[in-house]
Image (cartoon, helix red, strand yellow):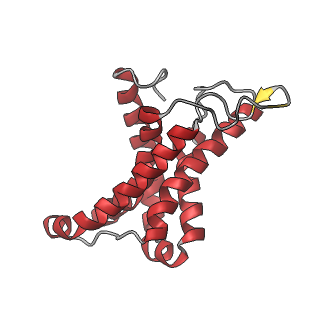
Amino acid sequence: MLRTVVAAFWAMLPAYVPNNAAVLFGGGPTIDGGRTLGGRRLLGDGKTWRGTAAGILSGTLLALVLNRLAPRIEGRLGCTLPRFSPRAALALPAGAMLGDIAASFLKRRTGRQRGAMVPGLDQLDFVAGALWVASTAAPRWFARTFTRRTVAAVLVMTPALHVGTNVVAYLVGLKDEPW
C-alpha cells in the first residue's frame, strides 16, 4: 500500500504544483477579460493568463526533473516510480489548471465570490482536470500509471495535502483565506 501511495504522489506532483505556482507568479490580465454572464464574472480576478502559464510551465518542468531523479530515488525507496511521457508531462499541469478554471466558472455561476469555499470541489477540481486531460492526451501512459488503487490513493491523499498547503500559504501571506 505504501508503494501505491508513493507512486500516486509522484505521478500527481506535476498536477499538484501548478496552482501553487499560479498563486506565486500570477497577476496581470485576467482570462475572462472582465466579461460577465448573467451579471456575474465568468471566472474572476484570480484566474490570469500569467498564473495559468506559470502553472503549466512549472508542472511540465517538474515532470521532466522527476524523470531525471527517478532512477536515483527508486533505489532509496525500493519501489518503481512513474516516468512522464512528453504528453503526460504537459497534460497533467494543463489539466490541473483547466480543472481549477472550470471550478471557478462553476462557483461564479452559483453566485459564490472569489475565495468562497466549496468542500470537495476546491480539493479535487484540479485532480479531475489533470486526470481527464492526461487520460485523453496520453491514454497508454495513463492506463499504466493510474490503476484503480493509484486513483483511490490520489482521491484520499489530495484533500489532506490541499488543505495543508493552503493553510501554510495563508499563514505566510500568500493567500487571503486558508482553504
| Whether residue 169 is situated above or below residue 147 in the rendered picture | above
Which residue is painted at 69% across and 27% down in the image? 112
State the residue lying farthest toward the front: 29
Q: Quadrant of residue 31?
A: top right
Which residue is painted at 62% across and 27% down in the image? 45
Which residue is painted at 60% across and 49% down in the image? 99
- Percent x, y for residue 114? 62, 26
Q: Quadrant of residue 100?
A: top right
Q: Which of 2 and 53 lies nearest the eye of the viewer?
A: 53
Which quadrant holds the N terminus? Answer: bottom left
Q: Is residue 157 visible?
A: no
- Percent x, y for residue 98? 60, 50
Judged left or right of residue 68, residue 52 is right
- Percent x, y for residue 125? 58, 46
- Percent x, y for residue 68? 25, 66
Q: Is residue 150 visible?
A: yes
Which residue is painted at 59% across and 62% down in the image? 132
State the residue lying farthest toward the left: 76
| Whether residue 33 is situated above or below residue 52 in the rendered picture | above
Q: Quadrant of residue 80?
A: bottom left
Judged left or right of residue 131, residue 172 is left
